[in-house]
Amino acid sequence: MRTIDETLQPDVSYRVRQRLGPLITRLAQTFGQPEYHLRDTEYVGTVQRPIDEFTETLQEHGFEWDPLAWYHLPPVGSEPDGSWTYQRTLLADRQIHTILIAHSPEYIDVFAHEEYNWLRHPIKHVRQVGIERKAGSSAMRRWIESHGIAVETRSRRRRQVAHAIDDLYNYLGSIIR
């Protein structure tokens, strides 16, 4: 059985990205920001399925793993586990950039934004010009749902608060009885 780390990235390109990461970062600093802070508006939702199954679905429908992606810093305090892009054509003007954060082998937070295609507009892309957070997350949510994949759209914090309130009501109800 494979561990979660073994299922997250394509082997060769992932290792190359890890080794060349510092060089890519130094080069990126010349033109723009080498890291990107994900925002709550980019939260697509949580998918409960094995990450390798979800990434296979992405690949089958034209998404490509992006070994040159910046370091994405999510608001939930976890490290990103995958960066995928989708362009209608290789030199499309814009692309959807999807970032996966696996909290377990079957629990994935999905973030997305729309941005300039790095192949067609490398400088705009590096400088993070024209990023459409809400449009990208909405488009990705529609894509996930259109492929019959259930997605929980409440953030982890909202779900935790809702569970805590439910637990409190249940506790108070047991005391009153």
Image (tube, rainbow, N blue to C red):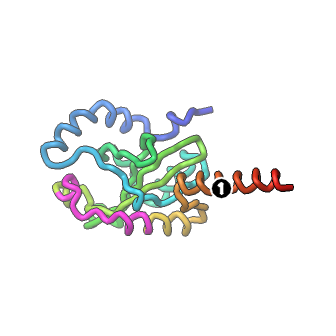
Side of 131 where 146 appears, left or right: right
Q: Position of residue 84 (x, y in %)?
A: 40, 52
Judging by the rendered image, the residue that carries numbered circle 1 is: 165
Measuring 57% from the left and 49% from the top, which residue is drawn there? 53
Amino acid under label 1? Ile
Q: Quadrant of residue 98?
A: bottom left
Specify whether residue 128 is painted magenta: yes
Q: Quadrant of residue 166?
A: bottom right
How packed mark 1 is, by other alpha carbons closer than 10 Å (few <14, some 14-19, many 20 or more), is few
Q: Position of residue 135 (x, y in %)?
A: 38, 69
* Residue positioned most to the top: 19
Q: Quadrant of residue 39?
A: bottom left
Specify whether residue 133 is painted magenta: yes
Image quadrant for the C terminus? bottom right
Q: How many numbered marks have been drawn onto this rendered protein structure?
A: 1
**Front residue (pair 149, 156):** 156
Measuring 55% from the left and 57% from the top, which residue is drawn there? 158
Side of 113 where 92 appears, left or right: left
**Front residue (pair 32, 16):** 32
Measuring 52% from the left and 56% from the top, which residue is drawn there? 155
Side of 87 where 119 appears, left or right: left
Q: Position of residue 73 (x, y in %)?
A: 36, 45
Q: Secondary structure at mark 1?
A: helix
**Front residue (pair 26, 121):** 26
* Residue positioned most to the front: 176
Q: Position of residue 60 (x, y in %)?
A: 49, 57
Image quadrant for the N terminus? top right
Q: Main secondary structure of the magenta part?
A: helix
Q: Where does the magenta region start and end?
A: 124-138
